[in-house]
Amino acid sequence: MARKLTANQFVLVASPHYVETHGRPTTLGELKQHKALLYRRPDGLLHWQAKTADGWEELRLNLAFASNQGYALLDQALAGTGIALLAEWGVANQIGDGGLVRIVIDDADVAISRNADSGIYLLYERPKYGLKKIQVAVDFLLSALVEHN
């Protein structure tokens, strides 16, 4: 069984110092001139995707730093190394306390992938749901974590 807990939206973020020093891009053309903090997969860099009026485009940005650890990308964003595309739930506190600012691109939607239905799911085997301890855990997680709109 797969039960969606919440959406997994990604947002562009940078430190206030980075924005003061390099400017805040508002168009895709401007974003392409900035330094990017990219996630490194086992098969290479995970390049960002941009959906424009003309369709999807893979962004090949100026690489400032790459890592396979989200915390390392977050640390570099906080340090002012470049712009990162990170999960909104993972940077909400840093945006709230002013450590990071959100970057909004007016002429494109920048995403981590072309899959618009990205989410965080709870996976469990249906037959195991009959076990009381599994049922209690699943029901608790669903009640505590499902995004209610």
Image (tube, grey):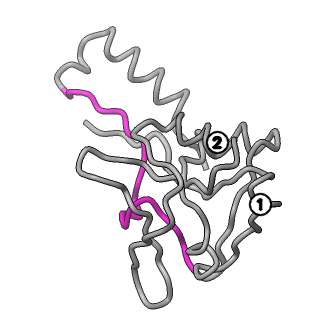
Q: Nearer the viewer, residue 81 or 2?
A: 81
Q: Earlier in the sequence, mark 2 or mark 1?
A: 1
Q: Within 10 Å of the Cα at label 1, are there few (<14), some (14-19), or many (20+) other Cα atoms?
A: some
Q: Residue furthest top?
A: 133
Counting from the top left corner in percent of width and height, residue 84 is at 57, 53
What residue would you read off at disc 1?
Answer: 19
Q: Position of 135 compared to 35: left or right?
A: left
Query: Is 122 in the magenta?
Result: yes
| Image quarter of the N terminus | top left
Identify which residue is drawn at 40% across, 59% down: 117
What residue would you read off at disc 2?
Answer: 91
What kind of element bears circle 2? helix
Counting from the top left corner in percent of width and height, residue 92 is at 68, 42
Identify which residue is drawn at 20% across, 19% down: 128
Say which amino acid is labelled 1.
Val
Identify which residue is drawn at 49% across, 68% down: 61
Q: Are marks 2 and 1 in contact (CB under 8 Å)?
A: no
Counting from the top left corner in percent of width and height, residue 83 is at 61, 57
Query: Is 78 in the magenta?
Result: no
Region rendered in magenta: 108-126
Say which amino acid is labelled 2.
Val
Q: Nearer the viewer, residue 58 or 125?
A: 58
Counting from the top left corner in percent of width and height, residue 42 is at 25, 44
In this rendering, the answer to whether 135 lies above or below 46 is above
What kind of element bears circle 1? helix
Q: Position of 104 compared to 29: left or right?
A: right
* Alpha carbons under labels 2 and 1: distance apart: 17 Å
Q: Nearer the viewer, residue 37 or 51?
A: 37
In this rendering, the answer to whether 41 lies above or below 46 is above
